[in-house]
Image: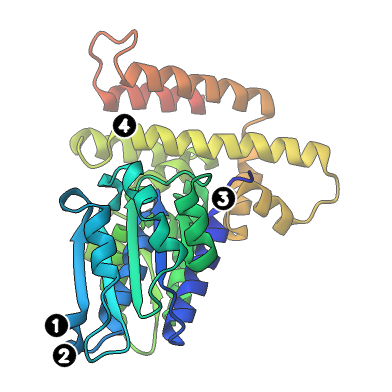
Amino acid sequence: MAKIRSKDVVAKYEQILDSLTKKIYHPVYLLMGEESFYIDKISEYISDNILNESEKAFNMLILYGMDTDARSIVYAASRPPMMASHQIVIVKEAQSLGLDDFEKMETYFTSPLSSTILVLCIKDKTIDKRTKAYKAIEKKGIILETVKLYDNELVDWITGYLRKKGANINPSAAAILADHIGSDLSRIVNELDKLFILLPENNRTITAEHIEKNIGISKEYNVFALGSAVLAGNVFNANRIINYYSKNPNSNPMIPVMASLFSQFVRVLKYHVIKRNSRGIQSKDIAAQLGISPFFLKDYESAAVKYPILKVVQIIELLREYDMKSKGWNNPGTPDTELLRELIFKIMH
């Protein structure tokens, strides 16, 4: 079975929301997988928008997987609505239900009540696609299986999210946010929504200055800035950032710094391979293969000049070595910031 791609998840998520806004409802929604953001957003839309406040009093039921079972869910879903077109039953934390619970609900999934909207929220897990329960939901309802975004997809996701809200973000600002927060979409959206509110009507563009002022991520001393300095071979800026880290050791933990540097040099290695094997390839196609915005391609072009392919391979080996040292291997107790200073020196000299 083909692996689910994050862009397919986004497309399916938007398709489901579009149908809901058009009042096209299905009797069962199975929302499951690694990325809780999409699960929460769809279940919130259903709970907030389908029934009015007076209808919710008799036709809205929230259950929790750890406190319920198949019999209770089926009983709730089988009731007719009272003075409303639909009733809604949302089962949160449905990952706490056992496999046998889903199999016991298979009869209901086969012939669900059309006036009930049953929403099953399964986070960080999925149910077996070979089961009768899954196949019954597939025929009668809607299934969304989510996956986490890769780090190199975050900048485009952030840009796309803001574009739908009528705003923009500078690529460097998006990279800073992605590097600092990681792939926690709920947290990213929370920060973006706060910034969006602060933007003036005549300039809907988020910058690094907005992020520094309102979120507290320094535009000069973040992980992205360090990686940019190293790729550019800017010894002064790299040392300035490391000095800042040594005075603020909790500002940027070693593990995400190492992960960011590793990802960047793997892209430099890929750039060398692409240029060697694909003569005449266009810049936008190189950027797509590297998984970056074309805006950042020039950084990797100059880095490839600064770091020949053999040197890049040596750097990747160094990064692996110092990643192990930061976790205690062959390290008598050297502080992380000193390990980082030593590593950067070896990379850039």
Tag in front: 2 or 4: 2
Q: Is residue 213 visible?
A: no
Mark 4 vs mark 3: in front: 3
Give whichever of discs 2 and 4 has the lower sequence position.
2
Q: Position of residue 315 (x, y in %)?
A: 54, 24
Q: Which mark is residue 254?
A: 4
Q: Nearer the viewer, mark 4 or mark 1?
A: 1
Instruction: Sort mark 2 into few (<14), some (14-19) or many (20+) by Cα contacts within 10 Å.
Output: few
Q: Which residue, given by chain and number where applicable, does mark 2 sit on?
A: 54
Residue 47, position as x, y percentages in the image? 27, 76
Scheme of colours in the image: rainbow
Q: Secondary structure at mark 1?
A: helix
The answer to whether the residue labelled 1 contacts the one labelled 2, judged by CB atoms less than 8 Å apart, is: yes
Looking at this view, is 251 or 132 the one in front?
132
Q: Pointer 1: what residue?
A: 57
Foreground: disc 3 or disc 1: 1
Residue picked out by circle 3: 4
Q: Nearer the viewer, residue 266 or 43?
A: 43
